[in-house]
Amino acid sequence: MDKQFVSQIADIETDFPQWYTDVVLKTKLVDYGPVKGTMVIRPYGYAVWENIQRELDARFKAAGVENAYFPLLIPMSFMTKEAEHVEGFAPEVAVVTHAGGAKLEEPLAVRPTSETIIGHMFGKWIESWRDLPLRQNQWCNVMRWEKTTRPFLRTSEFLWQEGHSVYATGEEAEAETLRMLALYREFAENVLCMPVLTGRKTEKEKFAGAVATYGMEAMMHDGKSLQSGTTHYMGQNFAKAFNIQYTGKDGALEYGYTMSYGVSTRLIGALIMTHGDSRGLVLPPPVAPVQVVIVPIAQKKAGVAEACAALSEELKACGVRAKVDDSDNSPGWKFNEWEMKGVPLRVELGPRDIENGKLTVFRRDTCEKGEICRENAAARIKELLAEIGAALYRKAETRMKERIVQAGSLEELLAGVDGGNFVRAGWCGERACEDRVKEFAQATARVLDENHTGKTCVCCGRPAKHTVYFARAY
C-alpha cells in the first residue's frame, strides 16, 4: 500500500484509539457536530446504518413486531414515576425548560429512552386480554448528556431502535426477552460477521428499573469489550408505574408484564474495531454500502468504460451493490482509497482483461489478488462475497476464543485484562467483590456464563455462585 495512504492513519497496534479516530474521519463515516459530544453521520456512514436497519427491521417484522413512533419530548413527571429508572438516568438527561420565549409549566426531558412515554401510551391503549401481546418498535434518536465522547461509541445524541412489548404473564415477557437476545446474536453473527457473548448482566450492570438485563458483548481488536445490544425484562415495574392493566378472561383486572430491547449506531463502532486493520476499514459484505468497486485500467482506451458499465449493471441485477470508479484519479490512488474505505471486493478491468476474458479481483479481508472468468462473473462474485463474510467471522471468532482466559485470583484477572483478554472467573455474587474487581483491575462484569464452572470467587475465595466474563470495556 502507498506510504502516503498508510501515513493517513495511526498504527493499529501501537495507538489503537487514534487509529479509530483517524479511520472514522478519513473514510468519511462521520464528522464532529458543532455541539460538543454530537456527531454528523455522513452519507457513507449512514449507508452502513441503513443496511443495519434494513436487516434488523426485516427480522423484527418477521417476528410480528410493528413499527411506531413516539415523541422526543417527555414530561419530567413521567421520568419520576419509576424511582430506580429516574435515578439511573438523572445524570444524563437533557431538560427543556423554555419554549416560545416563555418558561414551561413543566420541564420536558429530551428522550434518553422511551420506557416512560411508551408505558403511558400502552396504559391508554390496553384494555383487555385481547389487546395482548402488544409488541412495538421505533427507530429514532436519543440524547444522553455524556461527558466523554467518541463517534459511534459514546455520543450525546445517537440513533437506535427500541422495542417494547407487553404480555399477560411474566413467563411470556421473559421468553420474549431471551428471544430478542437470540435474534440480536443471529444478526451479529450472520450480518455483522461478529462473534459475541450473550448472557445475563449482574445487578450492578442491569438497566435502571429492570428486573433482569441481558447483554451482547463483542471483543474489539484491542481486547476490550463493547456492549453491542441489550434486552430487558421489566416485570411489572413499569406496568404499575404507568397503570398498564388489562381485564383477564376471568374478568379480573391485572397488571401486564413488560420488556424492552435495543441496539444503536454503536454497532458501526463495533464493526470498525472488530474487523478493521492497518489499512483502515474492513466492512462485512451484508452491510457494506459498496460491496464491489470496479476500477477501470486504462479507462480511456476503447471498450474499457463500456465493459466496466456492463459488469456493474450485471452485478446490480443480481442484487450486488456495485460501483464503477471512473474518476480522473490514478488506479493506484483508487486502490488505496477503496481499501481504506473497506469495500469487500475490488475488480480491476482493462484491455488485457477484456482480451483474455478474465477479471482481476482483490479481496479486502485477505488483501490478496486473484483471477476469475468474465463469463458467469456475477455468480462467482456473489460466492466470493459470501466467502469473505464467513472468513471475517472465523477470524474474529478465533481471536475471541484465543483471548478468553481463566483466572483464580485478582492478580491473574489483572494480568488477563492487561494482556487484552476477556477473563472468565468465579464470583460469589456479592456487590462488594464486583466493586473490588473494578477497583483492582479496572474491569467490569460483562455477562454471566450459563456454563457455571467457577469453584471459588476470584475476589474473596468463598464458593462461587456464578461464572462471569470480566473485561475492560468501552
Image (cartoon, helix red, strand yellow):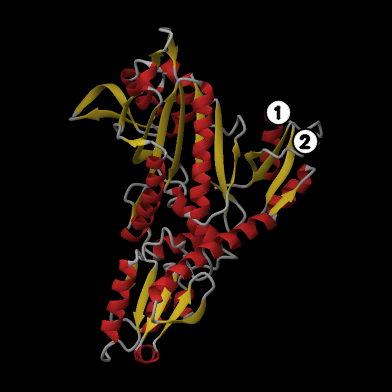
Local packing at callout 1 (Cα closer than 10 Å; few below 14, some 14-19, many 20+) is some
Q: Is residue 441 above or below residue 387?
A: above
Q: Position of residue 346 (x, y in %)?
A: 42, 75
Q: Position of residue 450 (x, y in %)?
A: 67, 38
Q: Position of residue 440 (x, y in %)?
A: 71, 42
Give me the residue at 46% from left, 42% from top.
147
Identify the disc placed on residue 430: 1
Q: Which of 223 and 188 lies nearest the eye of the viewer?
A: 188
Q: Quadrant of residue 143?
A: top left
Give me the residue at 36% from left, 27% from top.
118
Q: Which of 311 and 403 lies nearest the eye of the viewer?
A: 311
Mark 2, residue position: 457
Can residue 467 be seen? yes
Q: Does dot 1 land on a helix, a strand or a loop? A: loop
Q: Quadrant of residue 75?
A: top left
Give me the residue at 43% from left, 51% from top.
152
Q: Earlier in the sequence, mark 1 or mark 2?
A: 1
Local packing at callout 2 (Cα closer than 10 Å; few below 14, some 14-19, many 20+) is many
Q: Does dot 2 land on a helix, a strand or a loop? A: loop
Farthest residue toward the left? 100
Q: Is residue 12 above or below residue 5?
A: above
Q: Is residue 122 left or right of residue 260?
A: left
Residue type of the residue flagged with mark 2: Cys
Residue type of the residue flagged with mark 1: Glu
Give yes or no for contact between labels 1 and 2 (Cβ–Cβ under 8 Å): yes
Q: Quadrant of residue 163?
A: top left
Q: Position of residue 449 (x, y in %)?
A: 67, 40
Can residue 158 be seen? no
The answer for how far apart the CA atoms under marks 1 and 2 are is: 10 Å
